[in-house]
Amino acid sequence: MIKDIESGRINCVITKDLSRLGRNYLDCGLYLEVFFPEHNVRYIAVNDGVDTLNKSAMDITPFRNILNEMYSADVSVKIKSAYRARFQQGKFMGTYAPYGYIKDPADHNHLLIDDKVAHVVREIFDLALEGNGISKIRKHINKQHVLRPAAYGAEQGETGFERYFEDNEENRYIWSENSVRGILRSPIYAGNLAGYKRIAANMKSKKRPSKLPEEWEVIPDTHEGIVTQEEFDTVQQLITSRRLPENKGGFENIFAGIIKCADCGYALRAMSANRRKRPDIIDCVQYTCNNYGRYGNVVCTAHAIEARDLFNAVLADINRFADMAVNDERAVRAIKKRLTETDQSKAKAMEKEQKKLNKRLAELDRLFSSLYEDKVMERITERNFEMMSGKYQKEQLEIEARLKEVTETLNESYEKLQGIRDFLSLIRNYQGLKELDATVVNALINKILVSEREKSVDGTVKQEIKIYYKFIGFVGELHITPTKRWTALPHKNCMVCGVEYVPGSAISKYCPICAKKVQREKSNESKRRSREQKRMVCIEMSAKNDRLICRSETEELFVKAMKMPKLTYLTMLQSQHLIRTFSN
């Protein structure tokens, strides 16, 4: 309705009484005294006898608005006191039961344990009691493919949650850390009723700031708990005491709060790159998307960038602008023209148009004044007055709209030009900068967006970085070639040929050429040992077969000897021995 009034489509508003217009006497007074008269709108409140055309009836209107607000405030106090009384009696007042509970069919203000999902809550508390952090618990639950609380509530008929899963059904099974933290922090699961976690300042304010868990109002033993009070208290102590040391490993993250993912907007976190020890701690750190780190490639990709690459790129860009501000006036003018998007001729044309519009508005004001005098002196009829005033008013609205557009464009251009001047004046102080620190970064940069690495057809890998500077914003993207991790190692001398080379790892001993030769020699030696081992196995197997043959022949002779005289047996043994000796 307000938009229709502003566009001139409504000239009268009627309500049952003043309270239907509003119960905030400040807002009602603003509409009655300012907004409606400015837009030539007549207001009527039927039961209260209010009509803006009747000035005498409007004198008591402000007092009516105050009484309406007082009535609203009184009703608010009574409702709040009734809710607090029921809360202090231990009655659950929520629309839906929390995850892990259902409402008692016999008494909707009492909670019963939901056996379908109570074991999930129990498992979350057990994992926390074992010392696991919230992130680790979330990953464990996600592996079990359990419906998240919002998805489970939607299955039970609760409304307002389906919009989260329309685009991706897999989201039904992806728990967030806030869901796990909310369960671990809620006294509900210990059998206590918690309330007044967020309280508005007064009935007019819509802001409901959150309170700390220590400030919540808790009514003990209102229903059966899924965990005991001792277990709940222990978990609270564990959660409170879990703190990561600052600057772990000695690395100072000077881009904290500034570096963001270009795709999802999450912050990039500094983390260990899981590589061998390097001379500088910066060469052991890389930045990756926090959203990817929490939920995997379901929601985003790594956007990994080496800390050394980021530092070098930002430092080089700052030095480039500092040198430009000091030495290259042509480049400065080119940047001004590109950022303002308005050249001198266009700006002058807009300024001329602005003067012309202001002049016409002043003429219309004089015409309105003259027209009103003619009406009062009865020089023109009421019909002609309405026709001419409507025409002038329409033209006036069109001119004001165009004038606002032109003024905003010019102001934006002036602000950008002033921002460029401020930025150039600031960055001149950093010419020849050798090292970056948090003070320099926070003074010059609003945010840095890092894109995913892209591999071109020729096999080269590039990564795009966008730096948004103070006063001027985004100027141009940086395309860097990600550095391989081994380039941070110092040079070594080959142990074979003595040539200096860049090692691929801290235990490297040979240059690339000698490394291939040494690898080839080791491979040949390995093959030789393998062949020798196989030959020895064949010899042993042959000897074993010979022993088996001799044994079988001996047994056969023994059997024959049992059937012949002794002298004949001895003669046969001697002849067999001579034959074997000769064959060997």
Image (spheres, grey):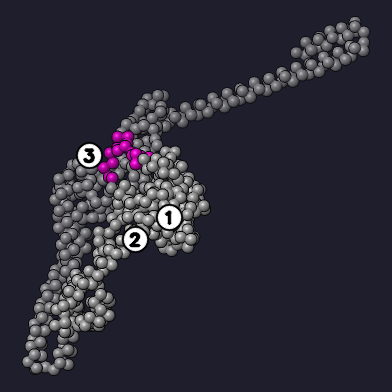
Does residue 142 show up magenta in the picture?
Answer: no
Q: From the viewer's perspective, is 216 left or right of 117?
A: left
Q: Which dot, 2 or 1, sits closer to the camera?
A: 2
Span of residues in magenta: 238-256
Viewer-proximal residue, 439 or 158?
Answer: 158
Give the quarter of the image for residue 389: bottom left
Earlier sequence position, callout 3 versus callout 2: 2
- Quarter of the image that includes the C terminus: top right
Viewer-proximal residue, 4 or 225?
Answer: 225
Residue 98 — which label? 1
Q: Amino acid at mark 3?
A: Glu
Residue at (17% x, 48% y) in the render:
427
- Label 3: which residue? 435
- The image shows residue 218 at horizontal and vertical percentages of 35, 50
- Label 2: which residue? 83
CA gap between label 3 and label 1 equals 53 Å
